[in-house]
Amino acid sequence: MAWAERTPDLTALRDAAQRAQPVALAREQVLPVLDGLEEVVAGPGLRRGTTAAVTGSVGVESFTLALAAGASQQGSWTAVVGLPSLGLVAAGQVGVALDRLAVIDAPPTASWGAVVAALTDGFDLVVLDARRGLPGRQVQRLSARVRERGAVLLLVGGDRGHRWPLAADIDVRVTDAAWEGLGAGHGFLRARTLSVEATGRRGATRCRRLDVQLPGPNGGLAVIPAAEEPIEPEVSPRPRLSVVAS
């Protein structure tokens, strides 16, 4: 479903939230993530009532969709607000259930908070563009509403001078990206490797690093196993010499 009006109809949004509510994973304290992403979120999934931010210069929207895909596959509804560049084909390939995805045009600043608050009544995941400037008071009220309703906010971007006024519970940064498959001017793009770093608050303060292929060879997410540290061979201590005669 999608709303194309410049000023979204709040009644329609609330109706959509009510329709989504019966299949939401309301009894679960965490929303599952795809296999291999548990290290990024420092646990079995995205904890309800929290905010996760994904920043970087490339691959940000793709990785945000990957974070939402696990819960989407298990029955959660996802709302995306103000991201016209979002690719629905890419969302489907990474695992997002398109029949449980709502895409909403960016509302005017005056009604932005009300629109997103209406969505948190029934959608488990709400994906927002964090690169637009928003009043801190509006953001504080929205964060309180997210905690109350048990939704999860996924924030996209924010590196270009527009930062979310409040610290995210999980902060993911895409630090590097490289395509594979092209030779010396020929070949086909097969996969893109993203390097990510994640930190956070409370129990997620330790910096965690992960390399993934997104898209991978099959179009979805493929986690690259961490290289094992080489095992140093044991060296027997050299025997000490002692003087036995002079």
Image (cartoon, rainbow, N blue to C red):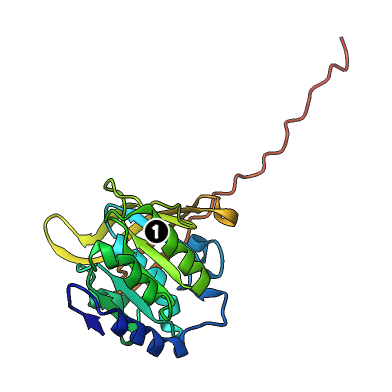
Left-right relation of 166 to 159: right
Where is 173 relative to 37, above or below? above
Where is 5 relative to 21, above or below? above
Q: Along the line of sight, which residue is nearer the eye, 150 or 172?
A: 150
Mark yes or no: residue 48 visible: no
Category of crowding for the residue at label 1, using alpha-carbon neighbours closer than 10 angstroms: few (below 14), some (14–19), many (at least 20): some
Residue at the image point whose x is 12% and y is 61% from the top = 186
Figure quadrant of the C terminus: top right
Question: Disc 1 marks which amino acid?
Answer: Val
Label tally: 1
Residue at the image point whose x is 39% and y is 65% from the top = 154
Figure quadrant of the N terminus: bottom left
Residue at the image point whose x is 23% and y is 70% from the top = 86
Residue under pointer 1: 139
Left-right relation of 105 to 119: left
Q: Residue 91 at x, y = what percent?
A: 29, 75
Q: Along the line of sight, which residue is nearer the eye, 214 or 53?
A: 53
The picture quadrant where one finds residue 60 is bottom left
Label 1: element kind: helix
Q: Residue 158 at x, y = what percent?
A: 31, 52
Q: Residue 165 at x, y = what percent?
A: 39, 51
Extreme-left residue of the structure:
185
Residue at the image point whose x is 51% and y is 66% from the top = 38
